[in-house]
Amino acid sequence: GPFFTSVPSGRVGRKGDDPDDLDFMFDNDEQFVNALVQAEGGDRAQINQRLKRIGKAAEASGFNGVLSRVGLAKLRTFLEKRVDECYRRNVQKIIPMLQAEYANTEKRLKACERELEALSIDRLRAGADAFCDEFCVCLRKALKGTIVAPTSLFGETLNQETANGGSFHDVVGCPMSVSDRTWDRLIDSDVGNRNHKLYGGSQYHRTLREFHLAVRCLRFPTIGEDEIANAAGIDESHDGVNFLHASCTIALEKAHVSFDPMLARLQMRMNHVMSRLGPVTEYMLRENRERQKLTSYNIDEEIETDDKAEQAMDISSNPQFRQLIRDIYEKFVARCS
């Protein structure tokens, strides 16, 4: 360098057929390129002519001559040469990087192929069946008693449980024969674990003990003379009073009136307790799988490849599948309760 050139005046691409629009002198790029070639030729001829006048025509040509730095073609040749030198200088650094990226890409591609092979209907069905079996096993352990799931996350005290599922002491239509103070004392003595955070079978059993206490503390319903008279009725075979039928009628009706609201509250409480077992079971299942990974850890590449294939078959990592299991479990609890 430096390089010298001149660019033709005018823009490329005419807007309409307006002859007064002098800014757009070229219809297309080809006309502009031809104008550049002509301008370069004119510049070189003019410089050569002036150098001859002053007696320096020998300086016009040659490797370091003036004409070697005139025109876009010379500038393009110079830039292409510099780019080629830069590329050749850095190619030794680029090739190892490209080889490493190629190896990583090929490794990821093989992993994707293994995952696609694992996404067959039979393998997905087998993975879903295995997850359901493990879910049922963990659910059974949670009902029998476990400490795998932390009580700080999943446990509830009796006050928290009654706040979420309702209490047996304030059921409408089921008056108690004991005062609130006596009820609190009986809760501590007959039910127990009032301030302990429970879940699973322990919480289930505590709810049943509270229900049993509430049934024992129910106030006996009053029976009026009019009700006794209406219960007597008349027998279909004679006009005498069937006292056994009357007694059973009164007992059944009073039992319905007294126990139906209490049983409805028990249904709400059990539904609440069992619904909370879904997240507990999922946590236990995840913990069991993490422990299995730690116990079966091996640095062997073949075993690691098999583990990746098993992970591809593990449908439980899919959030849609886990949500489906939750919905099925909640519907099962609601139907059973």
Image (cartoon, rainbow, N blue to C red):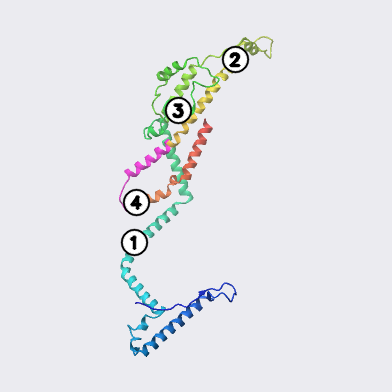
Nearest the viewer among 86 and 96 is: 86
Q: Which residue is mark 3?
A: 161
Total numbered badges shown on the rendered structure: 4
The quarter of the picture where residue 254 lies is: top right
The crowding category of the residue bearing disc 2, from other C-alpha atoms within 10 Å (few below 14, some 14 to 19, many at least 20), is: some
| Whole-percent x, y for residue 51 in the image | 36, 87
Q: Nearer the viewer, mark 1 or mark 2?
A: 1
- Circle number at residue 250: 2
Which type of secondary structure does the marked residue at label 4 adopt?
helix
Q: Earlier in the sequence, mark 3 or mark 2?
A: 3
| Amino acid found under the numbered disc labelled 3 | Glu
| Whole-percent x, y for residue 54 in the image | 35, 89
Which type of secondary structure does the marked residue at label 2 adopt?
helix
Q: Nearer the viewer, mark 1 or mark 4?
A: 1
Q: Nearer the viewer, mark 3 or mark 2?
A: 3
Q: Earlier in the sequence, mark 1 or mark 2?
A: 1
| Amino acid found under the numbered disc labelled 2 | Ile
Which type of secondary structure does the marked residue at label 3 adopt?
helix
Q: Earlier in the sequence, mark 2 or mark 4?
A: 2
Q: Earlier in the sequence, mark 3 or mark 1?
A: 1
Tell me how far mark 1 sits from mark 4, CA to CA.
Answer: 21 Å
Q: Nearer the viewer, mark 3 or mark 1?
A: 3
Q: Which residue is mark 1?
A: 100
Q: Which residue is mark 4?
A: 304
Asked if labels 4 and 1 touch by Cβ distance under 8 angstroms, the answer is: no
**Which residue is found at the position 43% from the left and 35% from the top?**
139
Q: Nearer the viewer, mark 3 or mark 4?
A: 3
| Amino acid found under the numbered disc labelled 4 | Glu
Q: Main secondary structure of the magenta part?
A: helix
**Which residue is found at the position 36% from the left and 82% from the top?**
68
Which type of secondary structure does the marked residue at label 1 adopt?
helix
